[in-house]
Amino acid sequence: MEIKELLNNPTTPLQKIEDEFIQNSGIELYVKRLDLTHPEISGNKWYKLKYNLVEAENKGYKKLLTFGGAFSNHIYATAAAGNLFNFETIGIIRGEEHLPLNHTLNFATSKGMKLFYLDRSSYREKTSSKALSLLKEKFGEFYLIPEGGSNQLAVKGCSEIIGEIGIPFDYICTACGTAGTLAGLSTGLNPTQKAIGFSVLKSGSFLNDNVKQLLTNFGETKNYKIITDYHFGGYAKITIELIEFINSFEKRHNIKLEPIYSAKMFHGIYDLLKNSYFKEGSKIIALHNGGLQGLEGLKDKIMFLENSRNQNSTGM
Ligand SMILES: *Cc1c(COP(=O)(O)O)cnc(C)c1O
């Protein structure tokens, strides 16, 4: 694959969600299947990385360096992109090394990514000028992609998602980790449309500052809202309720979700519908941002939750 092929976004389906609950709620719900963008650079990660990769190439960088947790979809996608487009990649991972490597980090390593671990307090300071100069000493010159891939070029890429929807709509929803995707969506909307972000982090209202910051060069927008009620305990916290939601959603619609991002958003959308949050007749788009690679690393946790439920329900 050549880097300029990133400029043309792949065509992905817009799938209408039809079930009794949606029909009774008086709105239309569609899923934009960005999970099908690319097998390894899926969902919003395609849009967040594309102009960063073009920029790194134009500026002659040979090396990409980025940050993430041990299950990060962004680490996974960056490792794959580096392999496809001939960049060396360095992943600075939060926390200690655990061997054997989990699915995500094993994949990243197999794509040639070099991993380097930072304890949690150093990780918090990872972009301080002191930390960055230490990284330069250690790894030489590199193109820096922030955690989650969120920077101005990511905003530019994500704004293109709006043009890929293909039908008129009133709301577009996305799960928020850094809110870079939400910032991009908000710059692409027409004046009657709104973007809604579902924070997957506890106390997600700080994400409003992230969006403002990311939009400094694009002009302020007021057409987005961050909903903070559906984090289910915080980042990567999973409950049996979420797992049951995922199972029932897949059965009805044949769409796989994962519990870190997409299930929290869809659960949130269904709950807001119950409370008539969206005006009657609205057309709502929900982004499926992929991230299904993460399910592999969550298998044990999910099985544990399902087993505990079964034991409770049989009185054992
Ligand atoms: C990275 C990711 C997000 C979060 O995107 P942000 O731009 O950081 O808010 C949401 N969903 C999935 C599946 C992701 O991989």
Image: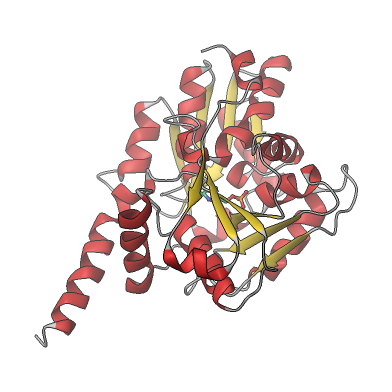
Total marks placed: 0
Front residue of 170 and 314: 170
List x then y, in percent, for residue 218: 87, 43
From the viewer's perspective, tell me whether residue 245 is left or right of residue 282.
Answer: left
Image point (52%, 15%), residue name: 86
Front residue of 94 and 53: 53
- In this view, the residue farthest toward the bottom is 315
When asked about the image quadrant of residue 246, the answer is bottom left
From the viewer's perspective, tell me whether residue 191 is left or right of residue 4.
Answer: right
List x then y, in percent, for residue 254: 34, 48
List x then y, in percent, for residue 214: 78, 48
Quadrant placement of the C terminus: bottom left
* Residue 142 visible, this orientation: no
List x then y, in percent, for residue 85: 53, 17
Which color scheme is applied? secondary structure
Image point (58%, 28%), residue name: 64
Q: Is residue 181 above or below residue 163?
A: below
Front residue of 143 and 204: 204
Q: In this view, does 109 lie above or below 240?
A: above
Q: In this view, does 185 lie above or below 3?
A: below
When asked about the image quadrant of residue 87, the answer is top right
Image point (59%, 79%), residue name: 275
- In this view, the residue farthest toward the right is 219
